[in-house]
């Protein structure tokens, strides 16, 4: 029997055995594996056996019993007054009207692709339809449905909703599992999880035994994990003809997916949304007249003047409109949107959204418009926070009797999540400040007004320069449509786009899939660990294959860091890196921390690099923020600054003053909490793998050896390394690939005039005009010689080979040779451990 099923059966068997022994019945209907297991004597037969295998008939009996129990429970709920009320709501959803069609399509096809407008009931209803129908068919106990979500908070909130609709507690029939959290039990038959969790499960259970239905949700987002999963599932379907795969999406290129799965059937759930009145920036300015004054002088560039100019110069309409608008934008602190410079500004100037304009629109809606919640799409969590701070100083918007202000982003905790769905009291207007997570994954019911800043953070990878970045970029037209659609769910709505129409016209139709714009290292490791054959061959079978150069870079990188050997096979180190749910470089750091007994600070660094930056730099208090940060930065290391900040926060937490401490020192309390949780998770992972002793409660306390910590950072980040050349009172930086590089202005090293070591290792480089290095740490020669890269990349004649080139190394050949021999031993030590 598949393990999942065994686990369930096991539970029932235990109960059965207990009852039997209570009743003093014998166990002759169970066939014991060996007589010894049953005690071997007549008496022993009345003791529950320690281990046993039993006949299929017994198992079937349990499953049958349980299935009818489930059906009775379901019926009782559906006939109860609450159950009826919920059923009434559910049947009003467009998806419900297609229930029979969906179920019959699923039974007829192995693969089905379902699309429908956001909010039509795909995520909450389709898995439920399957579960309900299986239960009705008295197959409840054998059905196992997994529904993947790209984001953890969607998985949690949706599972809560579905459990609620089934009149159950979460963790009974319906559960969820995401990194750090989960709620599932013996009786869970519908599990919402992140795509990453399912991929991880594939590591242990390649055939996904016992799973009857897999639903991959939100495939239109084309996340790298989803694209990868589809290739794996495509192969699996051939081995498991009874396994059903359902792909779901909001706006969908159904043809693409259908042809990928040999012309699989597609279904569209007809949707209904109310009309949404759309206003671009020029329209907003027009309706607002000149009321934006006196704050930001829009008066001078009033809409009339723009329209007049347009009339006078029809041929040059667009350029005139743009330049006039640009002035308007600038006046309204919208310089961010300047099309020529948006990239550099957006990256280096965090103060880029027209906060004044947003505040103005919000205030207008609150004072003059009909009731209805407002959803504001911002770029990221930083802007959301900054905007919130600004709004809290506004007399109307900060009044809790008039406004309920909530935030919606990827790292919310469960309490915050619940606030989003909360209905405000009469006369109070809900304002939700959200990232693009509210675009499709999360549906908030009462939204009538949407304000859209037009941007989202998008990661991109440039294979040619081997650089990657996470930058705010314009969203696609499809996303604009999604955002707009959120306003028309309950009644006719309004949408304010904070950019001019000509900018919208320049948006691309769809966003590029992640697999084409992300580094592929983790993916390559996963391919290897799932034994899926040659990396290039596997990726060539993806929905859209990544560039060959990107694949080669990833393989080369994995070889450099010692995760793959020359033949592209996983090394021992590589095998350990696969099970750590983080970038390989961070996994390497952890492993180093374990071996050299400096795990505590490394856990903080790795957790800190996994979350967003814990240091806040509000635009109006930059100097204060920098000053606060400098107290953590004596070590010429951004990574160690995270450790110092976290440790001080922990100290403050002991006196319950953590929040205040963060507030005073420009630290993000949420980030600190996430770091804390991730530390615990990573430690328990290391215990699971067997690298850390299971009984260890906390890791080696404050025995921070700076040399070792620098070594751990270098061991992880290599080949991210540059040389430091001092000249007069300043220094310059060079890497082999890029030549001269610069430091990101937020780096603690950017404020130094001297670096005491000849090397900086860095986490990430970003190319915007020049190449900039984010978080960096200064390291001495000996660390690079001993821990930089794998042994095969080192060279004995006083040079160090780095990513294809040689960097001068001012060490005597004999000394270098000595280091090399120590390295060999170390390498052996690390690999053997
Ligand atoms: O997946 P899709 O966007 O098609 O919709 P859904 O997430 O299944 O949501 C269907 C409906 O359930 C929404 O329109 C909401 O009215 C409701 N819902 C809710 O009230 N609370 C939630 N946490 C989730 C959904
Ligand atoms: Mg959905």
Image (tube, rainbow, N blue to C red):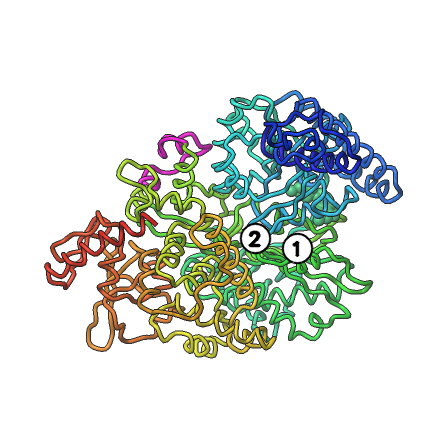
Is residue 492 on the magenta stretch?
A: no
Numbered tag placed on residue 180 in the rendering: 2
Q: Nearer the viewer, residue 429 or 217?
A: 217
Instruction: Place residue 369 in its image quadrant.
Output: bottom right
Q: Residue at x 73, y 39 (%)?
A: 272
Q: Nearer the viewer, residue 759 or 578?
A: 578
Depicted 18 relative to depicted 286: above or below: above
Numbered tag placed on residue 450 in the rendering: 1
> How far from the left and from the top, in percent, is residue 131?
71, 33
Is residue 542 on the magenta stretch?
A: yes
In the visual, does 461 lie left or right of 54?
A: left
Depicted 558 relative to depicted 244: above or below: below
User: How far apart are the alpha carbons under marks 1 and 2?
Assistant: 32 Å
Residue 246 visible here? no
Q: Residue at x 52, y 46 (%)?
A: 476
- Ligand 1 appears in which quadrant? top right
Instruction: Place residue 387 in its image quadrant.
Output: bottom right
Camera-side mark, 1 or 2: 2
> How far from the left and from the top, in percent, is residue 490?
76, 48
Q: Residue at x 31, y 64 (%)?
A: 742
Q: Residues within 10 Å of mark 1 (few under 14, many from 20)?
A: many
- Mark 2 beta carbon near ligand 1 (under 8 Å): no
Dot 2: element: loop
> How far from the left and from the top, in percent, is residue 407?
64, 61
Q: Nearer the viewer, residue 5 or 276?
A: 5
Lower position in the chain sequence, tag 1 or tag 2: 2
Q: Residue at x 49, y 66 (%)?
A: 614
Q: Which residues are magenta?
A: 532-552
């Amino acid at each position: 029997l598949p393990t999942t099923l065994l686990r369930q059966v096991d539970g029932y068997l235990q109960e059965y055995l207990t009852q039997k022994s209570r009743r003093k019945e014998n166990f002759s209907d169970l066939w014991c594996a060996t007589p010894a297991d049953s005690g071997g004597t007549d008496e022993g037969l009345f003791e529950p056996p320690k281990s046993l295998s039993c006949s299929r008939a017994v198992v079937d009996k349990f499953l049958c019993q349980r299935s009818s129990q489930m059906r009775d429970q379901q019926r009782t709920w559906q006939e109860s007054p609450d159950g009826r009320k919920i059923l009434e709501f559910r049947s009003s959803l467009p998806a419900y009207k297609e229930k029979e069609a969906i179920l019959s399509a699923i039974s007829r096809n192995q693969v089905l692709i379902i699309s429908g407008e956001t909010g039509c009931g795909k995520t909450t209803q389709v898995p439920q339809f399957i579960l309900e129908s299986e239960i009705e068919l008295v197959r409840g106990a054998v059905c196992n449905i997994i529904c993947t979500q790209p984001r953890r908070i969607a998985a949690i909130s949706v599972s809560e909703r579905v459990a609620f609709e089934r009149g159950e507690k979460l963790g009974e029939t319906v559960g969820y599992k995401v990194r750090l959290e989960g709620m599932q039990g013996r009786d869970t038959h519908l599990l919402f999880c992140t795509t990453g969790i399912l991929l991880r499960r594939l590591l242990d259970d390649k055939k996904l035994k016992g799973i009857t239905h897999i639903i991959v949700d939100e495939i239109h987002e084309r996340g790298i994990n989803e694209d990868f999963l589809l290739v794996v599932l495509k192969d699996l379907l051939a081995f498991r003809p009874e396994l059903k795969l359902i792909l779901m999406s909001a706006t969908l290129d159904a043809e693409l997916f259908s042809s990928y799965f040999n012309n699989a059937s597609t279904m569209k759930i007809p949707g209904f949304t109310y009309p949404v009145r759309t206003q671009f920036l020029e329209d907003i300015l027009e309706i607002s007249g000149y009321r934006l004054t006196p704050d930001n002088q829009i008066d001078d560039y009033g809409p009339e003047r723009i329209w007049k100019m347009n009339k006078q110069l029809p041929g040059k309409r667009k350029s005139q409109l743009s330049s006039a608008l640009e002035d308007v934008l600038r006046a309204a602190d919208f310089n961010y949107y300047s099309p020529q410079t948006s990239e550099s500004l957006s990256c280096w100037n965090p103060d880029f959204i027209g906060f004044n304009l947003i505040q103005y629109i919000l205030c207008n809606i609150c004072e003059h418009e009909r009731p209805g919640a407002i959803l504001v799409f911002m770029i990221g969590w930083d802007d959301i926070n900054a905007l919130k701070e600004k709004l809290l100083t506004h007399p109307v918007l900060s009044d809790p009797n008039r406004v309920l202000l909530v935030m919606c982003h990827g790292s919310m905790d469960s309490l915050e999540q619940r606030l989003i769905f909360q209905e405000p009291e009469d006369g109070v207007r809900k304002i939700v400040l959200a990232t693009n997570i509210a675009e499709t994954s999360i549906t908030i019911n009462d939204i009538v007004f949407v304000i859209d800043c037009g941007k989202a953070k998008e990661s991109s990878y440039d294979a040619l320069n081997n650089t990657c970045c996470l930058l705010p970029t314009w969203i696609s037209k499809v996303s604009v449509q999604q955002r707009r659609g959120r306003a028309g769910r309950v009644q006719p709505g309004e949408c304010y786009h904070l950019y001019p129409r000509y900018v919208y016209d320049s948006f691309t139709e769809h966003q590029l899939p992640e697999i084409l714009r992300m580094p592929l290292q983790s993916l390559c490791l996963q391919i290897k660990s799932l034994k899926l054959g040659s990396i290039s061959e596997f990726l060539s079978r993806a929905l859209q294959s990544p560039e060959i150069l990107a694949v080669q870079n990833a393989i080369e990188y994995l070889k450099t860091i010692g995760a793959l050997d020359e033949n592209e096979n996983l090394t021992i180190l590589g095998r350990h890196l696969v099970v750590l749910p983080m970038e390989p470089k961070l996994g390497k750091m952890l492993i180093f921390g374990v071996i050299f007994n400096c795990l505590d600070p490394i856990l903080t660094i790795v957790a800190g690099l996994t979350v967003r930056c814990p240091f806040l730099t509000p635009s109006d208090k930059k100097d204060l923020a920098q000053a606060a940060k400098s107290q953590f930065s004596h070590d010429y290391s951004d990574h160690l600054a995270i450790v110092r900040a976290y440790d001080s926060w922990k100290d403050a937490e002991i006196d319950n003053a953590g929040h205040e401490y963060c507030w005073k020192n420009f630290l993000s309390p949420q980030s600190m909490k996430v770091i804390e949780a991730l530390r615990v998770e990573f430690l328990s992972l290391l215990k699971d793998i067997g690298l850390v002793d299971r009984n260890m409660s906390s890791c080696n306390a404050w025995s921070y050896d700076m040399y070792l910590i620098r070594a751990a950072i270098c061991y992880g980040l290599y080949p991210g390394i540059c040389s430091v050349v001092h000249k007069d009172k300043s220094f310059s930086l060079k890497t082999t690939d890029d030549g001269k590089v610069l430091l990101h202005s937020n780096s603690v090293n950017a404020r130094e005039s001297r670096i005491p070591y000849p090397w900086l290792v860095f986490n990430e480089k970003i190319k915007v005009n020049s190449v900039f290095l984010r978080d960096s740490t200064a390291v001495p020669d000996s660390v690079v010689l001993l821990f930089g890269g794998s042994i095969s990349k080192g060279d004995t004649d006083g040079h160090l080979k780095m990513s294809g080139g040689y960097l001068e190394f001012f060490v005597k050949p004999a000394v270098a040779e000595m280091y090399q021999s120590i390295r060999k031993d170390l390498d052996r030590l690390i690999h053997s451990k």
